[in-house]
Image (tube, rainbow, N blue to C red):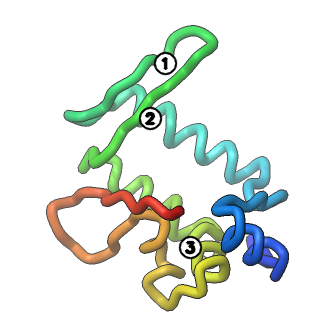
């Protein structure tokens, strides 16, 4: 699904460090995101932490090598990489998800995180 990033959204990110992207996640993508989340809850990796019970759910899962193919497919099939490239003015690597924390170069099967302020 294509998503158009406006100049106002780029400016908001530059000036405020945050941007609202209405409509970026449609019902089908939300379903896929939720499926990935609950798969990760059911198959926690070695450094997963959090609580998935009750109203205050907090679950952090980083670097589960078994999740890599699932999340690679999710990111590459979504507009996230292109939106990141449009927002930050990135090149090909950004379009493939690099700015989202996915390093597509084959290595130890980990996901790296980027913090942007």
In the image, 77: left or right of 51? right
Residue 103 screen position, x and y as percent: 33, 70
Q: Measuring 48% from the left and 65% from the top, which residue is drawn there?
A: 100
Residue highlighted by disc 3: 81
| Front one among 55 and 36 | 55
Residue highlighted by disc 1: 52
Q: Measuring 50% from the left and 31% from the top, which residue is drawn there?
A: 38
Q: How much space separates mark 2 and mark 1, taking CA atoms?
A: 12 Å
Residue 2 visible in the current orientation: no
Residue furthest left in the image: 108
Q: Say what secondary structure mark 1 lies in.
A: loop
| Nearer-N-terminus badge (3/2) | 2
Q: Say what secondary structure mark 2 lies in.
A: helix
The residue carrying pointer 2 sits among few (fewer than 14), some (14 to 19) or many (20 or more) residues within 10 Å by Cα, namely few
Asked if labels 2 and 3 touch by Cβ distance under 8 angstroms, the answer is no
Q: Tell me the mark number nearer the camera, choosing from 3 and 2.
A: 3
Q: How much space separates mark 1 and mark 3, taking CA atoms?
A: 28 Å
Residue highlighted by disc 2: 39
Q: How much space separates mark 3 and mark 2, taking CA atoms?
A: 22 Å
| Nearer-N-terminus badge (2/1) | 2
Residue 70 screen position, x and y as percent: 42, 53
Q: Tell me the mark number nearer the camera, choosing from 2 and 1.
A: 1
Indicate the quadrant where residue 77 lies: bottom right
Image height check: is 19 above or below 45? below
| Front one among 84 and 105 | 84
In the image, 59: left or right of 4? left
Q: Say what secondary structure mark 3 lies in.
A: helix
Residue 52 screen position, x and y as percent: 49, 18
Q: Measuring 58% from the left and 9% from the top, which residue is drawn there?
A: 54
| Nearer-N-terminus badge (1/3) | 1
Image height check: is 1 above or below 53? below
């Amino acid at each position: 699904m294509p998503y158009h990033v406006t100049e106002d959204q780029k400016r908001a990110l530059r000036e405020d460090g945050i941007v609202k992207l209405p409509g970026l996640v449609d019902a089908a993508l939300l379903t896929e995101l939720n499926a990935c989340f609950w798969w990760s809850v059911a198959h926690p990796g070695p450094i997963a932490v959090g609580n998935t019970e009750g109203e205050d759910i907090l679950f952090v899962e980083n670097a589960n090598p078994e999740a890599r193919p699932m999340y690679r497919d999710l990111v590459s099939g979504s507009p996230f990489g292109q939106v990141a490239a449009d927002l930050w003015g990135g090149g090909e690597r950004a379009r493939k998800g690099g700015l989202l924390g996915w390093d597509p170069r084959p290595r130890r099967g980990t996901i790296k995180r980027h913090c942007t302020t």
